[in-house]
Amino acid sequence: MRSFGMIIIRKVLYCFSYLSWIFRYVKVILGLNTVSDIKILSIEFSSVCNLRCKYCFLDQLDRARFLDIHIYEKLIKEVAENPKYNIRIMEWPISGEFLVYPKWREVVDITKKYMKENPNFRPHIILNENFMLMDEEKLDYILNAGVLSQIICSVDGHDAQSFENMRPPGKFPKIFKNIHLLYEKNKRLEKPVHIQINNGRDGQSIGKDFSEEMKKIFAKGDTITQWTPEYWNESFNKKNKEFYPAKGFCSFVFNNVTLSSSGKISKCCMDLRGQTQYADLSKNSLADIWNSRIRRDFLSLMFSGKRSLIQGCASCSITRTNNDNRYNNPLRIIKRKMKFISQKGKRYSTSGNT
């Protein structure tokens, strides 16, 4: 009965969401201001990573290894200084590793500069980190800049062995030390960032009790998110390479802008292989790209049920998902509370489904 009720609720929410997408689509067709619909900026600073996680298919392909820092500044300058934009969230990075990027300090400085000069530009900035390259100096630089709102720490498995199996060549003692360092430094800040621990569990880890060391890491987090690897599209590792493309409309194309390491705008932040790139930010403004003919064309295909004809979308199984990763997102708060109740007050579960 509970699952049936959830299905009904999701169907109702989808119907309301679909009406809002139609409204935004009509705005595009009529040539009205649509940049205010952009809520999330997802940035890929690097198409390479220091880890080789089992379920990730991060692939450089023809993309540059590192984003041109001038293109990043061009983007931030446009969205910060133009009052028509209303950016709520920025994610650093959506793939790759932030600290692999040679100019990560410039990213922090540029962002701080435009936030200081433009009081209306106050996005909730999320840093995704694997904590293998972190040290005290880097952590001080990032935290003391005051631009971050949230840090998501990826710590998979149920113990040191399963962690290192899922995230090679990661070393558990290294991330254990660095997350403890984050916790200690963060609590001394006048305005601490929110620490979120992301814990993935594969088939070899689900159902097993957490080690004492893993529990100590969880204790450092303000929130804990547990999940199992999903194989949404060709960006994710799956041995038999079978995907079941969705037929419905995808919400990502209306509220998310993804900047790839090549300096090109992609349709989706779930594309780790650069297959959905469609416009070059080095040659165009974001406003021109967002209102371009090429974007209108793929939106028309999406609405007319011809998703299979859209490059990068043909093999994807995503139709709608909550890509607002803020810890204070109302839907995520409700979900956490419901899980907390269902688990009888436990902060985390051995099932990997929280």
Image: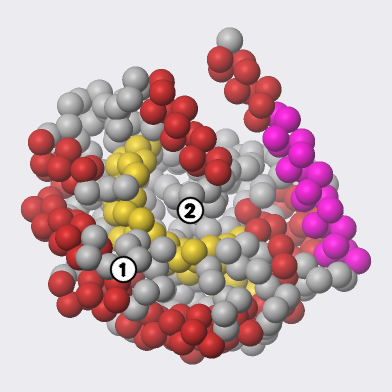
Q: Residue furthest right?
A: 30
Asked if the stretch drawn in magenta spans residue 28, the answer is: yes
Magenta span main SS: helix
Residue 217's disc is none
Which image quadrant for residue 194?
Answer: bottom left
**Secondary structure under the numbered disc 2 in the rendered image:** loop
Magenta-colored stretch includes residue 70:
no
Residue at 29% x, 51% y is: 154
Question: For residue 326, which numbered disc appears in the image?
Answer: 2
Q: On the image, which quarter does residue 47 sit in?
A: bottom left
Residue 268: x %, y % from top left: 58, 58
Q: CA distance from mark 2 to mark 1?
A: 20 Å
Q: What kind of residue is marked 1?
A: Glu
Q: Position of residue 1 (x, y in %)?
A: 58, 10
- Secondary element at tag 1: loop
Judging by the rendered image, the residue that carries numbered circle 1 is: 190
Mark 2, mark 1: which one is toward the viewer? Answer: 1
Q: Nearer the viewer, residue 216 or 253?
A: 216
* Badge 2 or badge 1: first in the primary sequence: 1
Please report contact status of discs 2 and 1: CB closer than 8 Å, yes or no. Answer: no
The span picked out in magenta is: 11-30
Question: Looking at the image, how many numbered discs can be counted on the residues?
Answer: 2
Which residue occupies the extreme front position in the image? 190
Answer above or below: position of 184 versus 141: above
Crowd around label 1: few <14 · some 14–19 · many ≥20 (10 Å): few
